[in-house]
Every structure is written in C-alpha cells, then in structure tokens.
Image: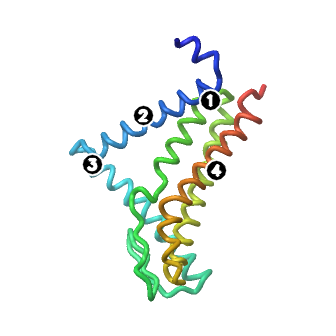
Amino acid sequence: MLSKIKENEGLLFIVKIITVYIVWTFIRETFNNVSFLEPIWWSFNDYFAAKYVAVSSWCLENWFNYDLIYNKRNILPSGSLGVYVGNHCLGISAKFIFIGIILSLKGKWFHKIWFTILGLGIIVLINFARILMLAKQLTEGKHFLFDLNHKYIYVVFVYGVIFGLIMIWEKYFANSK
C-alpha cells in the first residue's frame, strides 16, 4: 500500500497535507491542554496579536484618518463595536500548514527557505488586510458582511492563496536542477 501511495503523486500530496494537518493539530492541542505549556502558547499568541493590532491601528489612523483606541487585542474605532483579534485570527494554523507542505515537497532547500519566507510574508499581509477590512466594515455600517467575510471569505481566500503558492512551487521549483 505504501508503495502505491509513493507512486501516485496526487495521492502522496493529499497524504502529506493530511499529515501536516494532524501534526499541527497535535502541537496546538498539546500547547492548549498541557498546563505548563499553556502560558507559553498564550504569550506567543498575545505577542503576535499585539503586533497585528499595533500595525493595523497605525494604518487605520494614518491612512484612513480613523479616530480609535486600541490595546493588545482590540481595535475600537469611534462609533463601532470594535474588532477583537483572537488567536484564530493570527493565521498561525495557515502559516504552519504552508510551511509544512512546502518543506514536505520536492525541491532544493535554498528555494524552500526563501519561498517559505515569501509565503509567510504574504499570509501576514493578508491578515493585516483582513483586520483593516473588518474594521472598515464595522465603522461604515456593513455589519451584514462582517460575519461572511470573517468566517468564510477570508478562510477561502487565504487557503486559496496558499494553494496557489503550492502550485507555483510545483511548477517552478519542485524539479529545479
């Protein structure tokens, strides 16, 4: 059975994706459920949430002239309920899955390193754009789009971008000599 999987590149790719997802789930659940690791996990998430909030708030204030207040996890534009940046909003799962898939594919390690850094940068930019978009939706009265964008469109978009990056990898770097 293992030899059949290795012979079929499409099936092997699916097995790699499932394996990366299982490894990620195990790591995340371990950090969330082992008492001495949980504070490390929360500190890690708090650090990145604070960075996302700080940069997004700066953009909202300086590019869009928003009057707002913010802290480590919240952006509160005047006249809105605000945006809370939860752990799931940080894109850590998407980043880990992207890294795991690229590292598991064929190709030179030099290319894997710079391509992974590029991909992570793209995912981070998408997250910033997401936070900005959600804050603008809340302040401009488009509340009905908030849940749709927050829960569905962003997820489809970011994983579509990851899939596109994987296709670029496969086309240009997987078999590079």
Whole-number angstrom distance, CA of label 1 to CA of label 3: 31 Å
Whole-number angstrom distance, CA of label 4 to CA of label 2: 21 Å
Residue extending furthest left?
A: 35
**Residue 34: where, in percent of width, then height?**
24, 42
Q: Which tag, 4 or 3, sits closer to the chain's start? A: 3
Whole-number angstrom distance, CA of label 4 to CA of label 1: 17 Å
User: Which residue is at a point 53% across and 85% down the rendered structure image?
Assistant: 66
Q: Nearer the viewer, mark 4 or mark 3?
A: 4
Give the residue at mark 3. Answer: 38
Name the amino acid, label 4: Val
- Mark linked to residue 67: none
Give the residue at mark 4. Answer: 161
Give the residue at mark 2. Answer: 23
Total labels: the figure holds 4
Q: Residues within 10 Å of mark 3 (few under 14, many from 20)?
A: some
Name the amino acid, label 3: Glu
Verify CB contact (< 8 Å) between mark 4 and mark 2: no
**Residue 1: where, in percent of width, then height?**
52, 12
In what quadrant of the picture does the C terminus appear?
top right
